[in-house]
Amino acid sequence: MDTKKVLLIVEDDPGIQKQLKWSFDSYQTVIAGNREEAITALRRFMPSVVTLDLGLPPDTANASEGLATLKEILLLAPATKVIVVTGNDERDNAIKAVAMGAYDFYQKPVDLDVLSLIIARAFQLDQLEKDYVNLQKNSEEPLKGIIATSEKMQNLSKMIEKIAPTNVTTLLLGESGTGKEVLAKAIHGLSNRADKPFVAVNCAAIPENLLESELFGYEKGAFSGATKQTIGKIEYAEGGTFFLDEIGDLPFSLQAKLLRFIQERTIERLGGPTAIPVDVRIICATHQNIQKAIEDGLFREDLYYRINEITVNIPPLRERDGDAIVIATALLKRFSDENGKKIKGFTEEAAQVIESYQWPGNIRQLENKIKRAVIMADDNVLTSKDLDLAQAAEEEIPLNLKKVREVAETNAIKRALAYTNNHVSNAAKLLGVTRPTLYALFNKYGIDV
């Protein structure tokens, strides 16, 4: 059985057919010379990527037959990455094809290095999308809401699985937008408290003069305006998990009272005469440097040691190789469904920008960009302009083809190793190369296993 990735080339010129088949022998290359042959091959071989010459018989002088073929391919297999190939004077037809759902376009005369790169990127994006679908379908994936294909996030997920069944007080450290609350909910969801409340309080979002009553509650008459007994958020979490977000912003005046609660697991409502026992699992999070806050006298050292029995460091999105495009694909589907749009994917340029952009706002920024793009987009594929990252495309994507290939291959190899838990033979199979070839690439790019 041939395990090579399937590439369908739809081209009526015998000379170009022979050239492309010879050039792309690393794939299982299937040739079709017209629409009927293309659809037959599509049904039989189910190719992930198709190159489609728009000038097909019986109307080789125009693009009508090619565009009809594109429409039929996408109708039968919407996830197929179709790269349309046009003449230099047919740019308008190429743009029309992309608007119909083509992955990208390429203008003749054929430069095999450039076309090879476009095809490789199409296969890479196809694999990322399939990885995401598999993650969604896999019922053994326990971390709800977390997409973890990178090695760092897979290791973090394993750590979360070990922490969750215990009652250990956990401190989540990470930049803003990295998904600290999502991880806290994952810990709660995997614990024996999952059927009890998950209550979150953001210390930075509540004024200091209200935070104490918000946390601990108050009795009727405790202060002006306290007309009835009110239970605090900690007490609401009884039996479940209490998540204290941005604990680095907790006022110093409240830190002693929180420390006493963590030590004794009792609270006192404002104006209340007695201590009330509360059974909760405590998870805290912050983006701040707590050690520096301790040095500056802004955070109690004894409280710090109480809240970080175990510390989980969440990597920023820019350090999660391969995750950005997978997360973006998931968000695209979600927001398209929510807004009644039929957007099928990203242009190659947009996918490159998503992967190479540094994402200073992390997943929250990516989510905002995708949501805005889905709402504002006119076509059924998103461009870097739709994402408001056109300038980033110019700044982030190297123009040197050798450098682009190096970045793409290095990222693909690292993802394959992470996906197979550093099993070289399985990684080689996933990448479609031999073990010796993969070892040669390790040496070439300085990748340690």
Image (tube, grey):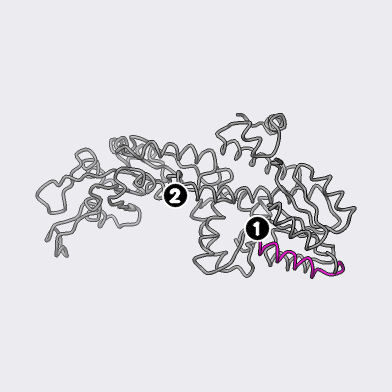
Q: Residue at x 71, y 45 (%)?
A: 404
Answer whether residue 157 is magenta in the image: no
Left or right placement of residue 411 versus residue 68 in this view: left
**Mark 1: few, some, or many residues within 10 Å (few <14, many ≥20)?**
few
Measure the C-alpha gap from mark 2 to mark 1: 26 Å
Location of residue 45 in the rendering, given as x and y in whole percent from the top left corner? 71, 51
Answer whether residue 74 is magenta in the image: yes
The residue identified by callout 1 is 391
Residue 255 disc label: none
Q: Quadrant of the C terminus?
A: top right
| SS of the residue under disc 1 | helix
Count every numbered label the image shows and give the total: 2
Amino acid carrying label 2: it is Gly
Residue 179 disc label: 2
Left or right placement of residue 418 versus residue 275 in this view: right
Q: Quadrant of the N terminus?
A: top right
Q: Main secondary structure of the magenta part?
A: helix
**Mark 2: few, some, or many residues within 10 Å (few <14, many ≥20)?**
many
Residue found farthest to the right: 15
Q: Quadrant of residue 305?
A: top left
Magenta region: which residues?
60-78
